[in-house]
Image: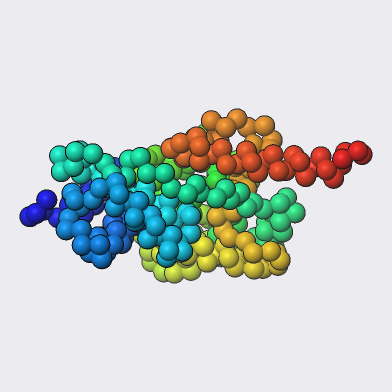
Amino acid sequence: MTGRNWEQEFSNYLSTERNYSEHTNINYLHDIQDFHQFMVEEAIAQFADVAYADVRLYLTYLRKKEFARTTVARKISSLRSFYAFLLREGVMTENPFASVSHTKKQLRLPKFFYSQEMEALFGVVYDNNDPLTLRDRALLEILYATGIRVSECAGILLPDIDQTYQAILIRGKGNKERYVPFGAFALDAVNDYTIGSRDVLMEHHQKEHNYLLVNHYGDPLTPRGIRYCLSKVIEKAALTRKIHPHMLRHTFATDLLNNGADMRTVQELLGHASLSSTQIYTHVTKEHLKDTYMKHHPRA
């Protein structure tokens, strides 16, 4: 293995062949670097020298450091992928992480907004028609209507919106594209925002670009900016429990399933590569059904 930077080659592979985002790439490399530090402490010279017994020792090492189960699972997954790459390149004859069983991830149900909470949020963005409120109205309507991620929302361009068919071209993880429909409320909010807010801000600050969502300077709204705008809306709505903007995506999926949408359709709309990622929402809907039953059945 000497003479070649396998970590860098793996990083290039993730970027070019797997189309992974820079953020995901950095997380993979961070996990590999942590493992390399463990190798140094255990006097393991190079990646090719790692055996299954070393992997079991590494699991013990992680548990002693009291990492969360989800963190341990992610690190093992990263290293399994890295060694699969080394196996493909002929560096290894077997993947020492292939058969490792690690602590199962704790099932954490997605949190979502209840109907009265959604009403409170929409009440905030419909209280006046100043440019930034129009922007926040369009933002909230789009996220709830489509269930897209905040990062995907930031990337929407004006030509991506098909008003005739009421669908938006979304560029998701791994540069995968999908069309997501949206309803009349979102359509009206986008049109009101474009005319009464975006055009005004762009002209005032002499900016030219195709990004749909802009800040008060007319520059494209970043994912961080979107989270800030949503946090302010949530704050104005005076909701009492601890909430996060990503809950809009969970609410979108939960509301669809509660109203009879099939799992495959929700999977496609959310842009999940695997159905297992979408199935977590069935647990939420079951809890919703149980709560409704216990509150309303006379002999519950």
Q: Which residue is found at the position 18% from the left and 49% from the top?
A: 48
Q: Position of residue 183 (x, y in %)?
A: 60, 40
Residue pictured at 29% horizontal, 52% vertical = 54
In the displayed structure, does residue 27 sit left or right of residue 230? left
The residue sitting at 19% across, 38% down in the picture is 93
Drawn side of residue 185 relative to residue 201, left or right:
right
Q: Quadrant of the C terminus?
A: top right
Q: Nearer the viewer, residue 50 or 251?
A: 50
Q: Camera-side residue: 284 or 133?
A: 284
Residue found at x 23% / y 39% = 94
Would residue 262 be seen by someone viewing this image from the given angle?
A: yes
Q: Position of residue 191 (x, y in %)?
A: 55, 50
Q: Is residue 157 above or below residue 225?
A: above
Q: Is residue 69 left or right of residue 47?
A: right
Instruction: Give the residue furthest to the left.
Output: 3
Q: Position of residue 78 (x, y in %)?
A: 34, 50
Q: Residue furthest front?
A: 53
Q: Is residue 70 above or below residue 291?
A: below
**Residue 138: % across, % down:** 57, 54
